[in-house]
Amino acid sequence: MTPPRPPLETSPGAAQPAPAPAGATPSTGYFYRFSPGQRLLHATLFTTFLGLALTGLTLRFSEARWAQAFAQVVGGFRAILFFHKSLALILTAAFLLHLAIILRRVFLKREFGLLWGPNSLVPQPKDFLDLGSHFRWFLGLGPRPRFDRFTYWEKFDYWAVFWGMAVIGISGYSMWFAPFVSRLLPGSWLNVALLLHGDEALLAAWFIFSIHFFNTHLRPGSFPMDTVIFTGRLTEREFEEKHPREYARLKAEGRLADLRAGPAQPWFVVAGKIIGFAAIAIGFVLLVLTLYSFF
């Protein structure tokens, strides 16, 4: 969720890059990609999203047998609603913190590269060119595009979440605080909010549990699990293959060594994979159940 800092920056308290081991090869060297703070925000995002999806879809399809069975296990639909609202508060706090970090970096630290350039998540002309080049590569009509720090689908994922947070959040809080909102807006807005909240949340869940999971973990080159969001680092071979333009730029500028990292602890990698596979499994189960209930 949080856009990573430019390559030369690290978060306060982050571990210092380890010196490159002697005789390191492109497959054994490691480089930092995400800071501890960014990984923590992402962990908060995906855990609360899973919880919100589970509780929200249970409420959305409350007449389905699976929803009634789940609600009975956790104490009824009133308990489901309590957990849903509690998770919404946590996710809202994380989202506001994310916005505060961006505003601080742009307006106080004057990191305008967040708004445009190779380290920005803002869509740029090259992203549309990469999209066309990628489709031509899929069809064997051209070379594979050389991606920079962020690919076009990573930017799409980011802004889809950003848009979803605004629509789902505003509509959800409107229903939560309906008496107050009805003093400011016509009562018909609450009907609109109900439709927006349910349909946008359903769309978000289906997108995350299918497209995002595939793009991140299940596509060739990442299957069966991309652990970079858990460990914060990737191998030099992965760096050069997945983000060749960033790799070449940093190497030409002599800044590549600043991102050098040691390998993550084995237990940490295993824990990341367990958490990741559990999230994918829960997502796929919810995808199947909601598709069955919807159609």
Image (cartoon, grey):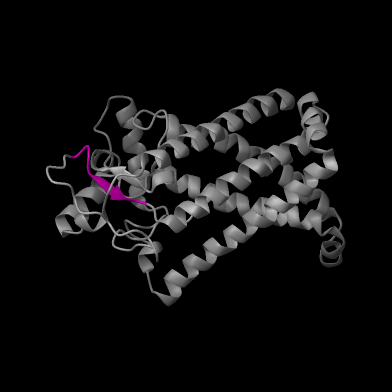
Examine the rendering and report whether any part of residue 273 can be seen. yes
Picture coordinates of residue 134, whole percent (x, y):
33, 35
Main secondary structure found in the magenta portion: loop
Is 182 positioned to the left or the right of 238 in the image?
right
Pick the residue in front: 115 or 54: 54
Q: In which quarter of the image is residue 94?
A: bottom right
On screen, residue 187 above or below 209: below
Q: Residue at x 62, y 38 (%)?
A: 205
| x then y, percent, for residue 26 | 19, 40
Q: Which of 48 and 127 is in front in this view?
A: 48
Q: Is residue 3 visible?
A: no
Instruction: Give the residue furthest to the bottom.
Output: 108
28 part of magenta stretch: yes
Q: Position of residue 197 (x, y in %)?
A: 72, 47
Q: Position of residue 159 (x, y in %)?
A: 51, 51
Q: Is residue 243 above or below residue 4?
A: above
Side of 131 where 99 appears, left or right = right
Q: Residue at x 36, y 48 (%)?
A: 150
Residue 156 vs 98, above or below: the answer is above
Q: What stretch is highlighted in magenta?
A: 26-33
Q: Which residue is drawn at 86% across and 62% down?
A: 182
Q: Which residue is drawn at 76% across and 44% down?
A: 195
Residue 80: in magenta span = no
Split into 4 quadrants, where in the image is the C terminus?
A: top right
Depth check, front residue: 175 or 76: 76
Count of numbered badges drawn on the protein? 0
